[in-house]
Amino acid sequence: MSRLSRALVLGVVLAAALSIGCADTLRTVKHANATYAIALSRTRTAAAAPYRAAVTAAIAANPTREGYNRAMEAWHALRTSLDLGRDASYALDAVLSAIAAGATESWLQAAACVLAAVVPIIDGAGRVGLELPPEMQSALGLFRGLSLQACRGSSQ
């Protein structure tokens, strides 16, 4: 299954869970997003030294910009995924804050964007051999846990 397909499946699961109005869903999404934000920060920190080493090696081994770009393609993809993941997390946080202040707009799309952003980060880290902090898997697990079954038995 491609990472886009996995992200879409996870997004659909999250949207389904959120759309039925589980009492604890909002709190769970806030917790998952906070865990995810910590994981993003720790992933950036963990990636900094290997990224610098990869840049140095790519410059030394590639006299052309094209060669450098090819050598750094996986690292640049990971950096882009981390940036998009951060932006999606900020967007979800803003939407959740608006809901807490009484807004009634739908927040399904923002939550699904964060969930969809996790998968490319995990894939990108794997491509460059970077071990992710356990919080990243925890965040993914929390988002995945927002399934229809998690809502059974909760007050609505």
Image (cartoon, rainbow, N blue to C red):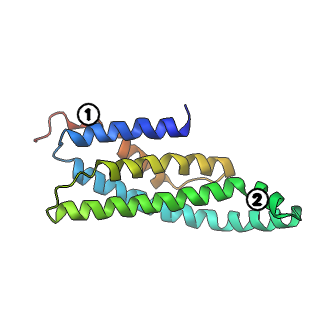
Extreme-left residue of the structure = 155
Residue pointed to by mark 1: 148
Residue placed at 19% from the left, 38% from the top? Answer: 20
| Gap between marks 1 and 2 measured at Cα | 44 Å
Tell me which numbered mark, 1 or 2, is placed earlier along the sequence.
2
Residue type of the residue flagged with mark 1: Leu
* Labels in figure, total: 2
Work out whether residue 130 can be spotted. Answer: yes
Disc nearest the viewer among 1 and 2: 2
Residue placed at 44% from the left, 46% from the top? Answer: 116
Q: Residue 123, relative to residue 76: is it above or below?
A: above
Residue pointed to by mark 2: 69
In the rendered image, the quadrant that contains the C terminus is top left
Give how far across and how far down residue 147 sits, in percent: 30, 36
Question: Which residue is at the front of the view, 34 or 77?
Answer: 77
Q: Is residue 103 left or right of residue 6?
A: left
Work out whether residue 137 can be spotted. Answer: no
In the rendered image, the quadrant that contains the N terminus is top right
Q: Is residue 102 left or right of residue 13?
A: left
Q: Secondary structure at mark 1?
A: helix
Residue type of the residue flagged with mark 2: Asn
Give how far across and how far down residue 26 sits, in percent: 23, 52
- Disc marking residue 5: none
Mark 2, Cα crowd under 10 Å, few <14 / some 14-19 / many 20+, is some
Residue placed at 29% from the left, 52% from the top? Answer: 29
Q: Secondary structure at mark 2?
A: helix
